[in-house]
Image (spheres, rainbow, N blue to C red):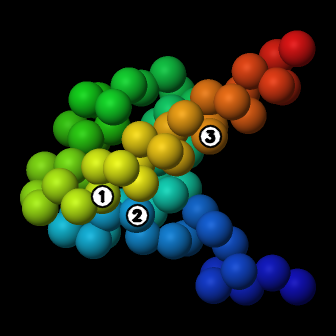
Amino acid sequence: MTTQQDNPDNEVICYCSGTKRGQIRELFLQGKDVEAISRWTGALTGCGGCEWDIQEFLEELAIEQSKQST
């Protein structure tokens, strides 16, 4: 059985705004870009420490999406 702790979508990726990976995944799948994701969640508007993690995560999501569409 999977718990909340085992679900990577529950992992906080931006501590300033409390944004979780699942929120970013959902917005990405809706076609939102980094700027829109930042506006919707508040991520990347605080200390900026999450910038690399979010960029890397979005790249992973883009790769996953391209693999699924082939």
In the rendered structure, the answer to whether residue 36 lies left or right of residue 54 reads left
Q: Which residue is mark 3?
A: 60
Q: Residue at x 21, y 38 (%)?
A: 39
Neighbourhood count class around disc 3 (C-alpha, 10 Å): few under 14, some 14–19, many 20 upward? few
Q: Quadrant of the C terminus?
A: top right
Q: Earlier in the sequence, mark 1 or mark 2?
A: 2
Which amino acid does the dot numbered 2 rest on? Ile
Neighbourhood count class around disc 2 (C-alpha, 10 Å): few under 14, some 14–19, many 20 upward? many
Q: CB under 8 Å between callouts 3 and 1?
A: no
Q: Earlier in the sequence, mark 3 or mark 1?
A: 1
Q: Which residue is mark 2?
A: 13
As helix, strand or loop, the secondary structure at mark 3 comes to helix
Which amino acid does the dot numbered 1 rest on? Cys
In the rendered structure, the answer to whether residue 58 lies left or right of residue 62 reads left
Q: Earlier in the sequence, mark 3 or mark 2?
A: 2
As helix, strand or loop, the secondary structure at mark 1 comes to loop
- Nearer the observer: mark 3 or 2; the answer is 3
Which amino acid does the dot numbered 3 rest on? Glu
Residue 41 seen in this snapshot: no
Q: Residue at x 11, y 58 (%)?
A: 46
Neighbourhood count class around disc 1 (C-alpha, 10 Å): few under 14, some 14–19, many 20 upward? some
Give how far apart the Cα atoms at labels 3 and 1 are.
15 Å
Give how far apart the Cα atoms at labels 3 and 2 are.
14 Å
In the rendered structure, the answer to whether residue 6 lies left or right of residue 33 reads right
Q: Residue at x 29, y 49 (%)?
A: 51
| Image quadrant in which you'd find residue 69 | top right
As drawn, 19 above or below 63: below
Q: CB under 8 Å between callouts 1 and 2?
A: yes
Residue 9 seen in this snapshot: yes
Q: Which residue is mark 1?
A: 50
